[in-house]
Image (tube, rainbow, N blue to C red):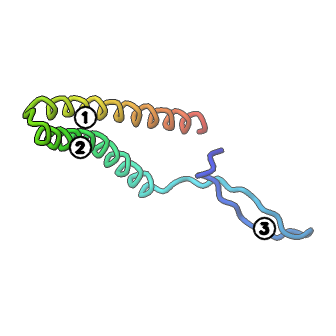
Amino acid sequence: MNADNEKKVLKLNEFGFEIEKLQVKPKKSQKRLGLLVNASEMGFSIALPIVLGVLFGVWLDKKFNTQPKLTLSFLMLGVFFSFANLYLIIKEFTRKDGKDKKEM
């Protein structure tokens, strides 16, 4: 049982109180919100390293007067890190999806 899908309920019986765990299914709106969060996370994980790499490269190029070399180098490094982040996110997402299907 997944801890996110459990709800604890306090019940009164003849001996006193007891805590009972109930299985709760997530609402469709919660699933949609989760998909929206995943999509925005993927967008940021792709765009942010590329933009930061370019900005850092431009700043270093201005500082050391090596116009396109460092900008292009950090652009490529940003693209590499973007794909690495995307790979890790997809790997985590498929692992969660596989666990959910096994629990059903």
Question: Which circle's residue, 2 or 3, is located before the other in the chain?
Answer: 3
Neighbour tally class for label 1: few under 14, some 14-19, many 20 plus, Cα within 10 Å: many
Whole-percent x and y of residue 61? 12, 37
Q: Give the quadrant of the N terminus.
A: top right
Q: Quick one: 73 or 50, which is closer to the camera?
A: 73
In the depicted structure, whether residue 50 falls above or below residue 37 = above
Q: Which residue is drawn at 54% across and 35% down?
A: 101
**Amino acid on which the number 3 mark rests in the picture:** Lys
Whole-percent x and y of residue 72? 14, 30
Q: Quick one: 102 or 81, which is closer to the camera?
A: 81
Q: Quick one: 37 or 18, which is closer to the camera?
A: 37
Q: Which mark is residue 78?
A: 1
Mark-to-mark CA distance, 2 and 3: 54 Å
Mark-to-mark CA distance, 1 and 3: 55 Å
Total marks placed: 3
Q: Quick one: 57 or 35, which is closer to the camera?
A: 57
Image-based side of 7 in relation to 33, left or right: right
Question: Which circle's residue, 1 or 3, is located before the other in the chain?
Answer: 3
Tag in front: 2 or 3? 2
Question: Which circle's residue, 1 or 2, is located before the other in the chain?
Answer: 2
**Amino acid on which the number 2 mark rests in the picture:** Leu
What residue sits right under mark 2 in the picture?
52
Q: Which residue is drawn at 21% across and 42% down?
A: 56
